[in-house]
Amino acid sequence: MRKLGRKWRWFHRMGSPRWFYEITGGWLPWLIPLAFSLLAIGLFWGLFLAPPDARQGQSYRIIFVHVPASFLALVGYYVLAIAGAVGLIWRIKMSFILMKAAAPIGAALTFIALFTGAIWGKPTWGTYWVWDARITSMLILLFLYLGVMALQRALVSTDTAFKASAILALVGTVNIPIIYKSVDWWYTLHQPATLKLTSSSTMHIEMLQPLFFMICGFYLFYMLVLILFARLEILQREKSSRWVRSLVSEDCVI
Amino acid sequence: MSNIARSTHPGLMAYVRRDVSLSIRSNSGAYAPLLFFCMVCTLVPISISPNPQKLAELAPGIIWIMALLASLLSIERIFVFDYEDGSLEQMLIAPNMMAFPVLGKIIAHWLVTGLPLTFLSPAIGLMFALPNNAYGPMILSLAAGTAYLSLVGAVIASLTVSLGRGGFLISLLAVPLYMPILVFGTSTVTYAVAKMPWSAPLATMGAMLAIALVLCPLLASWALRVTNGG
Amino acid sequence: MVFPLPNDFLLEADDVSYVRDDMIIFEDVKLSLSEGEIVHITGPNGCGKTTLIKILTTIITPTRGAVYYKGRSASDVRYQYLSDLLYIGHKTGIKSSLNAEENLLWMAAADGIEDNRIVLDALSMMGFDSGLCHRPCGQLSAGQLQRVALSRLVFTEKHIWFLDEPMAALDSVSIKAVNQCIASHLERNGAVLITSHQPIDFHPVRKFELTNWCL
């Protein structure tokens, strides 16, 4: 009985924006240098130290941005959908705030993935764009992100906006695999395997090491930006509450 | 006898009848998507080429895109009038499960847009020099596909119901979700044109329709509760 | 087992609070309604009268607290509760392309009545001009629309009525007719919950004041 009480108290506290704001405030001094140093190491290693690719030469180096970005673009959608689902089921406001924060970050990452992919595609396959299953589903993913953001913005009541965009995010989650499979099936139908994008198995270990750093760095960077966006949203939403006011006046004194 | 036993709340069929007659009575509503479908289809040969061979190649995709757009244009009407005049609140407090009236409204939407489109499509196919063997698959795929479009569109329409009419948001939200059915719909017709067996994509469409038939009314009624403040 | 409220209130709101967009609309509202009783909810504009009625009719879920129907949670006995309530809000649910009779027949079906005669009688009792009967409701005035919607009160057999500003657009003759309907409903042990800026002239009317929490 007591255990349950403690568990629920923890749950309740986690749902409180103020608690989130205070606890993440302590994380930031660690998270910021860690994320940026990992990114710096990964970039330097990947762009200058790693050997050039046997077939693609120097142009392959864009994967050190492209791969982590597309990876997190996908992960980000699940973060968004899970945060939305948790918010819907347990009615936790903080979860909705995280969902709202995850949408623009995910959209930006998806855009970076598409953009770097196009740049990479030109020297490698001679074209900026192909209607390949992966690329097409990435584009749809961007639309899904934009849709969640647009719905969030359009609905006047924030409570309704949170719930409605969470439902939309869940519907989108069901659709992502269907979209991917259908586009994949459609593409193989129209263009029987002219180019294979999957060649990760041939990657040299010296290329994988900096890539690993970049992926870790992107993960931390994603977390960092998510936390910062969520903190901003908390301050905006709770601007009339006493703790935010005292926080602001404290800052002014210093 | 208690009054609970006597009350006969309008169910699925009552909503189908009511919504069909309402959209027929409203001045332009029911026919506008159909007209749109025909008008845009006449633009295609003019803008691309009157060459029958080229048209026959494009026909499956064009007919399908037009069907999708026609359904998209009309889907916002499914709940927005009910929201404006308060019928939706009455639906929310009906004791029966809300998914049934919602399904009734979706069926009505399909009966006034998807089904006439399906019947109209052979005429468009004729004008686009579609080969004879493709008509059957086209009609079947459109019948199943437009029903799917109405079902999925209803979920999106219920999320955006409080935003009123004439918004672009509904298109932004619905188009990504319409993508898979478009792939299988056009494939069915393209296969038939190429004289390949077309039952596989059609069967996939049937499976998707079956799933949507179960899930979408539930999702839409949940979303309607949420957007009405629940 | 804990029985929450062993009482014979037809309807009870127990410490209902509603927070919307980080704004407290109202807090810890206690409200009860017995058979044969009329409660008049009053309060300034924007104090949440309509929201309270929507919470009581289960359209809106309260942030805290619950609604009880005959001592049991309304969400547990949802079917029985909703079968027993009638709600006429600001937006009355009238379709502008249907005429008055058709509109009322649809609503009557929800009340368990499928007889055209009863519906037509109700319209004339409410003072609705029979010459307008075949016009689509989109051509009618606000007061006439209100009369069409309120004609339900004549024939409905539901127990609990929720009327949100029913008199707003009515003339004195129709107000009289509505009051008559309410009186006979109370005599039959029905219950009425009403919001209105007009004074309600029933003898045992209980006032329920909602204060403005937003201030």
Image (spheres, coloured by chain):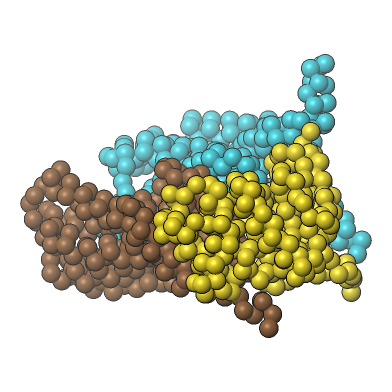
Chain colours: A cyan, B brown, C yellow
Furthest residue to the top?
A253
The residue located at (59%, 74%) in the rendering is C112
Q: Position of residue B25 (x, y in %)?
A: 35, 58
Question: Do we see residue B120 in this rendering?
Answer: yes
Corner quadrant of residue A17:
top right
In this rendering, would B119 be left or right of A117?
A: left
Question: Do we see residue C49 in this rendering?
Answer: no
Furthest residue to the front?
C173
Reply above or below: A59 against C178.
above
The residue located at (49%, 56%) in the rendering is C129
Q: Position of residue C22 (x, y in %)?
A: 73, 40
In this rendering, would A167 be left or right of B35?
A: right
In this rendering, would C136 be left or right of C118?
A: left
Which of the pair B48/A31 is nearer the observer?
B48
Q: Position of residue C44 (x, y in %)?
A: 75, 38
The residue located at (58%, 59%) in the rendering is C126
Furthest residue to the left?
B51
Q: Position of residue B203 (x, y in %)?
A: 34, 73
